[in-house]
Amino acid sequence: MAKLPEVRIIELEDDICDDTPCTLSVAFVRITVENHLNNQELIDEIGDTVLTYDEQYIKAFFNKYDNDVIEYAYILHENDVNEKGEVEQAHYHICMRKTNKTNFKFDMLKHAFPVGKIEQGRTWEYMLQYLLHKNAPEKTPHSVDEIVTNIDGGTLDLYLKSTPSVKKRSALERNFDKLQDDILEYKIFQYQFREQLATNKMFRKLMAEFDTKIEKSFVAQKVGWYEKYKHTRSLEVIFIEGGGGCGKTALAIAYCQQRKWSYYIASDENDPMQDYASQHCLILDELRDDTFSYSSFMRLLNTYTGTTVKSRYHNKAFTGEAIIIPSYLPLSEYYKPDVKKKKKYVADESFYGDNSLVQLHRRIKTLVRAEKDLFYVYDHKKDGSNVLREKIPNPAYLIKPEEDKSHVSTEDFVGASEIFAQTLIESGKVDAEEYKLFKAYMNERLSTPNDVIFNANGAPITFEDYKAYHNAKELAGGELLDSEGKRIELKDFVREDRIVPAVPEQDITLDFTEDDMRVTQYFERCMLKELQDKVAILQKAIEILRTDKTA
């Protein structure tokens, strides 16, 4: 058993009420007798992975105080039964208050009882009466002899017989009480509550204040509904098979609208029941036969008994009236062995019959085959056969193929490009004037046919060429003129002999393994000639500037 620790603050991961103050005038503590720990700091503190509370531990805590300073009372509840009919773990309830008008520090109590629930009590009388469950008649009753206390018998008797004054509840609290009653009496279901959140301001306030309690109330509602109707309900199961674009899901939704059913479309293959909120109909959209195990699927479709389905956090009770399964995979292919995909479906031992798939087919009474122009409605038999009942026109036949066109405005991308450029300019990665010149080059290039801005002997002029030309013009004072005073255009500035010949000299080969040096020298000559030509152009431009005073 863990020793009583010294009083110091330890950050712990357990159930602490958000509204618990830093100090408590009247403290109410609930601790489970045996606690398996996952908090490493606490494990290190007590030297064990199990923290056990017993009466000796509790007495050691109260021995720190003089009897004239504190009043306390505690009781062990060993065989309490919860609302689900399950026996709860053995636990202590502890009431304490100081008689010298001082308060308990929450941190101190939390360190003494690190695994437990610590609350500010309502009233002293109410807390003491709760030890016996006098004010909770639905719970297991206890006798006064079970209480351990330092309060004398006469005074304790008065406390237990008095009528505690209870704090006046706010309008929000009263509305929550009404909502909770409506939930537990099946007057409002979770999907209806969620729908109301968009328009009902009070519901939003209740959700903000009591979200956890509301969620627990709906869980209790589903459990109650499940227990009440699990042996009496008759579940309608409809299977709709067909290819893509045949209106399978649309028909399922329209069927619910025709029946005036609320519906929940479960499309998350990892947890189809995660957001189910007690709707009338569950639509398992594009279900595959590997979404549920065979046994889980059989339980879900069980026609005459209640259904609980495995979900991420806890099993969900399905309380609806119908399940519709739109599927591209035909029903005849469900849960059949597939050697290629290594599927080996075998019925649970709990299912009997010569053919395990009889259990599946027996649960599905209606099959709809969706074709492009018709819906075929069948009575489905347990041997897998079908009896045609009706042929119904399929309006999906008239749906025109949607044009694969984005509705996104290109103007937004233009603006985005400018923002991107500005970001680069501000970060120093791009020069503002160079970007302005680049935009001019690209606009001129994109405005010419075949994405060629202009060319020098068939070769596109690069941005570097464009920039060199404009730099030369700037150096010349605005325009480049030749010796005759004629303006030098960009295509004249980029001389045709700058272009590397397409065919090299005859004695040159591109075999880099044998003629590496000669090939390198050849291309070096070409590059040198290009540079020489550009220097000549610039020298000519400078000469014009020196001789022509009007330039």
Image: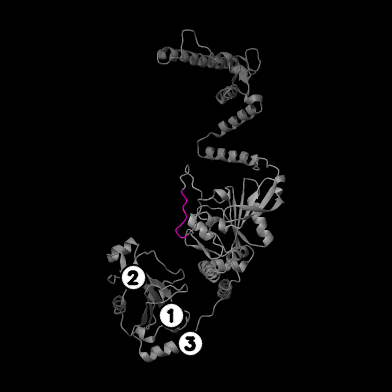
In this rendering, which labeled residue sits more in front, label 3 or label 2? 2
Over which residues does the magenta segment extend?
344-350
Magenta-colored segment: predominant secondary structure: loop
Tell me which numbered mark, 1 or 3, is placed earlier along the sequence.
1
Q: Name the residue under label 2.
A: 34
Tell me which numbered mark, 2 or 1, is placed earlier along the sequence.
2
Q: Distance between the residues labelled 3 and 2?
A: 34 Å
Q: Name the residue under label 3.
A: 163
Q: Give SS at disc 2.
A: strand
Q: Give SS at disc 3.
A: loop
Q: Give SS at disc 1.
A: loop
Question: Residue 500 location, x and y as percent?
Answer: 53, 15
In this rendering, which labeled residue sits more in front, label 1 or label 3? 1
Tell me which numbered mark, 3 or 2, is placed earlier along the sequence.
2
Question: Which of these two is toward me, 324 or 25?
Answer: 324
Label ID, residue 140: 1
Question: Which of these two is toward me, 442 or 260?
Answer: 260
Q: Is 347 contained in the magenta span?
A: yes
- Locate residue 27 relative to residue 538 in the image: left or right: left
Q: Quadrant of residue 49?
A: bottom left
